[in-house]
Image (tube, rainbow, N blue to C red):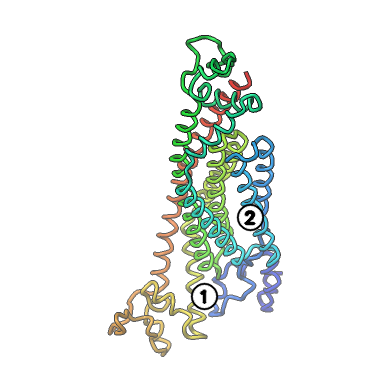
Amino acid sequence: MVEVAWQANNMDALQQKHECCGKSSAQDYVHLSQLIPPSCYADLQQAPDHLYLIGVTLIALSVFELNSSTPGTFEHIAIVVQIFVGTFVVLTSFLGCFASARISLGLVWSYVICLLILLCLQIYIIAAAHSTDYVERSKRDFLAIWSDPRANVERISFIQQKYSCCGELGSHDYILMGRGIPSTCYKAFLRHGDFLFTEGCLRAVQAHATDNVVIGLIIKWLLLLVETAGILAALAGVYELDKFNEGSAEHLEKFVQLGMAGALIFAGLVGCLGAILGSIKVMVVNLIVLLILIAAHIWKVSHYNETKQLDATEVYVMDLWMKELVHHGAMHHLQQEYECCGDKGYSDYTSLNMKVPRSCFHTKDGIHALYPYAEGCMAAVQRSYLQIYRFEKWIHCGLIGYEVVGIILGITLCCQLTNKTRRYTY
């Protein structure tokens, strides 16, 4: 059937249906000096858009955490912001689905714009954090609670156990009020003088707020850097995807790379939220995402194939050269960027009685060199792409190590949170 379709020059339907090209490869068209037909190109709109799942997961997790938070607290506000971010991601996904039911470069650009908006939001949060006196606010909040100790007995008890403190200025506050010192003023609820907390809660809360300001700013700046890195990674993925979209079988790997960049940002956000909120459930989600990322990195490294990369690059350059023979100018950008000329060299033009284009000459201050570039674009582009491909491999190996460290830290934090929960339950 393939031979009959090839002889009849009717391969389009077969190539689209089975995602193949030529009898053996795209080189069959190149050897016949024919342009590679559009049916050989990967359709960028084949993978379904599952971006909305991230937003739905984020919203569901936030709603679950919202039930255990106190309205008006920083934790409550943070969860509300998290719901907003999840909703924003879902709406962005629906926008991508409305434009196209399948993945496209336009959807990737929507993802980049989404990250830019999150980046602007992060900058606003950092500016607000620098202009807000959290220590003074924590003082006001505690004094408001302490003004009516009977109505706020549960919150005061929680603060005393959490910060290892007693009363406003010390345990004598209860004595002055004519009340006994509660068990929450003792370590592990053991009513013994050696276990009594001596520090007042007002001072403890302010000290904790001071520490949180420093830690919070560090986390906010790290998130800003992660989001910036995510934008750069997404743009790099778009650039590579655009480079390899003709005569290349690299689409799946490039989409996996884009997905990994997004998942890495998502894992960073979830991990920071889990650490800030002290939630084991959020940390478990972070650990699952990190494990998925490690599996994706291993898949990427296991599919490392330099020969396949060189073949894909050869098809890409050859296709541009065939277009250059039909429409002059198709090779200009490639020749300027990689300082090369023709397919094998500038003799490719002269042997066909074609004028060597200006893009084959080194140009400086409007004056171009006397002789064209000696190296052909096939060798120059293959060498450049191979360097990028090898660099990507080491990046993936380094990220595996980074994510393993993240998993170890996450498990350690989960163990500490579990022990703390058991103590409070007791």
- Viewer-proximal residue, 20 or 330? 330
Task: Say which label, 2 or 1, has the lower sequence index.
Answer: 2
x, y (%) of residue 76? Answer: 62, 41
Q: Quadrant of residue 109?
A: bottom right
Circle on res. 311: none
Q: Quadrant of the image for the C terminus?
A: top right
- Viewer-proximal residue, 201 or 259? 201
Identify the residue shown where x is 59% and y is 15%.
179
Please tell me whether mark 2 sits on a helix, a strand or a loop.
helix
Residue tagged 2: 89
Determine whether, in the image, residue 169 is placed left or right of residue 114. left
Q: Are marks 2 and 1 in contact (CB under 8 Å)?
A: no
x, y (%) of residue 93? Answer: 66, 58
x, y (%) of residue 280? Answer: 60, 33
Please tell me whether mark 1 sits on a helix, a strand or a loop.
helix
User: Which amino acid, mark 1?
Assistant: Asp
Q: Quadrant of residue 386?
A: bottom left
Identify the residue shown where x is 42% and y is 76%.
343
- Viewer-proximal residue, 212 or 238? 212
Q: Looking at the picture, does residue 373 appear above or below residue 426?
A: below
Q: Quadrant of the image for the N terminus?
A: bottom right
User: Which amino acid, mark 2?
Assistant: Val
Residue tagged 1: 319
